[in-house]
Every structure is written in structure tokens, then in C-alpha cells.
Image (spheres, rainbow, N blue to C red):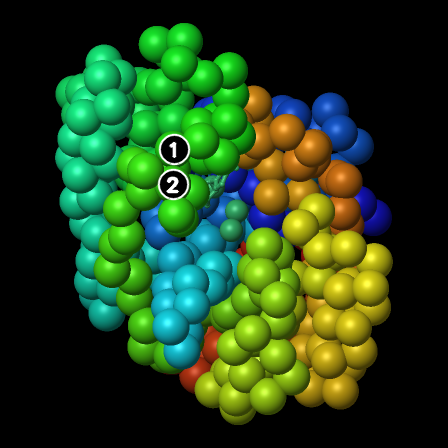
Amino acid sequence: MRIDLHAHTCMSDGTDTPSELVRAAVAAGLDVVAITDHDTSVGWDEAAAAARAAGIGLLRGMEISTRFRGRGVHLLGYLPDPTHPGLLAELRSVLDGRDARVPAMVARLRDLGLDVTVEGVRRLAGPTAAVGRPHVADALVAKGYVASRGEAFDRYLSPGRVAYASRAAGDLETMLAALRAAGGVGVVAHPWGRHDPGVLDHDGLAHLADLGLVGIEVDHQDHDAASRAELREIARSLGLVVTGSSDYHGHGKVDHDLGCNLTAPDELERLLDAAAAAARAAGRDVPAMIWPHPPV
Ligand code: AMP
Ligand code: ZN
Ligand code: FE
Ligand code: FE
């Protein structure tokens, strides 16, 4: 079984439509793929229809931007009720916070003499629910100022660069509670990517496990072999599920091809057991992932 539990579509900052993601997952030889757009479930229905047609397993999730002890943390939330009012309100404030800084970033770029506009960024962003820095980067690429999103981040949009603007993000503990109230389960995404362990060291992760975190994304391109080994050991000691995934963004990110990291089948089974328990605790029908065949 080839299982990849983290991928983006054009409903956030990937470049494939949800249907194209599902077809790309089949082409990459995956048995299960998760759709995890930033802070939104708007791609779920299209992806589900495509997965049923293509005969591939689909796990519906989202990657939520949060803050924990002063640091940005991405939380993968799987199988919540996407209509739960408390969760929706939290996601709305994250989406609004991301959207609200686009004019500030554009203004800084214009001060440098670069001809980008808020309208241009929004037009390029297309159907996404989460307009943000990647789409500002796309506008810079479209005008020929940089060759790629990566170069746009490196030169202008990363923290410390001239056009970076900070934004509000939901508190991780609050978000974890909202996710659980909606019957979903949380896995911390790439905890040591681009950072030292910092607040997500053993003690920080143990604290989150006490609050109901169920897993850690260990196998991710942003983690080297030593980090993966150490995170795997922390997960084992805390009884947390270990996941692996590509963080695929279509053409939006290089070196994140579907299937480049995988999740073990028994870890997916533990994740689904936890999701079923969370759904029952929230008083919901057990939400299923979409299987190509009825699960045995
Ligand atoms: P935002 O939520 O608006 O701050 O945008 C952050 C998103 O931009 C991340 O989740 C990544 O998907 C994407 N991103 C960050 N750094 C890069 C990079 N160097 N190249 C391409 N995409 C990036
Ligand atoms: Zn992204
Ligand atoms: Fe992320
Ligand atoms: Fe991601």
C-alpha cells in the first residue's frame, strides 16, 4: 500500500484541481491520497467524486495555520465535520488573516517599483479559498521579476525579507479543541521543518498529546534523516501515530512529488481508529475515508 497523507490543490496554493490531484495520485501509483488544502475543505466534494470514479482511497483533511508558544505551527486535521460552526469560525479567522495582509505585501512591492496589484494577485489566485503569499509570488513570476515561487519567497516574501507582512493565526490549542469538537483528529505537520525543534520538542509535543493530538508527520522533505529518527522515537514514546507525505503542491513547489514520502498502512489504520473515536465522542456518525473497495 502506498499512502500519501498531505497534498494541496488549487483550492489553496497547489496548482492541480482536486480532480487533477486524484488523477496524479493514481498516476503516481498511490493507493491512498489525502487532500489537505490550507484552512479549507472546499475541494473535498470534487476530490471525493474523482476518487470514487478513479478507484483510489481518499482521506479528507486540511492543513490549518496556527500559533503555539509564539511560533507558527501547521496542524493537519483529518475528517472533521466541515460544517461544524466552531471549526468554521476558527478557519474563517485564519483565512481572513491571510487575506488581509496581501494589500500590505503588494504595497511594499510597489514601493520597490514592482508592478503588481491586489486585483492581479486575486485574479491569478483563481478559485482558491486561501489567498496568500504563494499567490503574491505567482504575480511576481507572471511579471517576470522572479523565475519561481521559491525565488519570490527567498527574495521578497519570507520572514525578514522586504515585502513580508506578519499575520494573525489561530491559537493551536484552541484549534485542536475546535477540530476535536468537529469530530476530527490532528497531526502536527513537518514539526521540525525550517526550524529547530524549539517549542515542538519532546515536552511541547507531550503537552499537545495530552490535549488530544494524535500524530506527528515524521517523513517530510523538510526533515533530514536524523530529525526523522528522533521524531519517530518521540512519537513512539508518546504513543502518537507516525505519518509520511509529500506535501505536494503541483507545480507550486519543487521536490515534493506525490509519493516521495509514505505512511505505513498500520499507522493509517491507527489514525482512522482515532478518527472514528473522535467522531463518536463528538456525537457524529463515524466519518469514513473513501475506499476504492469497501474496507475489510
Ligand atoms: P501563507 O499562508 O500566505 O503565509 O503562505 C505560506 C505557504 O506558502 C506555505 O504553506 C507553503 O505552501 C508556501 N511556501 C512557503 N515557502 C515557500 C517556498 N519557498 N516556495 C514555495 N512555496 C512556499
Ligand atoms: Zn501550501
Ligand atoms: Fe505546511
Ligand atoms: Fe502543506
Circle 1 SS class: helix
> Residue 248 in the image: x percent, y percent?
60, 37
Q: In this rendered view, identify the residue nearer to me: 88 or 175.
A: 175
Looking at the image, residue 38 sits to the left or right of residue 49; the answer is left
Q: In this rendered view, identify the residue nearer to me: 212 or 124.
A: 124
Query: Which image quadrant is residue 88 in?
Result: bottom left
Tell me if residue 54 can be seen: no
Image height check: is 90 above or below 34?
A: below
Tell me if residue 151 can be seen: yes
Q: How many marks?
A: 2
> Residue 44 in the image: x percent, y percent?
43, 42
Which residue does the image show at 16% across and 30% down from the upper left? 107
The disc at residue 156 is: 1
Which residue does the image show at 72% across and 67% down from the upper left? 242
Which residue does the image show at 40% across and 78% down from the upper left? 69
Image height check: is 13 above or below 239?
A: above
Q: In this rendered view, identify the residue nearer to me: 25 or 253.
A: 253
Q: Which residue is mark 2?
A: 161
Type of the residue with mark 2: Arg
- Image quarter (top left, top right, bottom left or bottom right) of the C terminus: bottom right
> Residue 158 in the image: x percent, y percent?
42, 43
Image height check: is 95 above or below 176?
A: above
Circle 2 SS class: loop
Which residue does the image show at 76% across and 65% down from the upper left? 227
Neighbour class for label 2 at 10 Å: few (<14), some, many (≥20)?
few
Q: Are marks 2 and 1 in contact (CB under 8 Å)?
A: yes
> Residue 89 in the image: x percent, y percent?
20, 62
Type of the residue with mark 1: Tyr
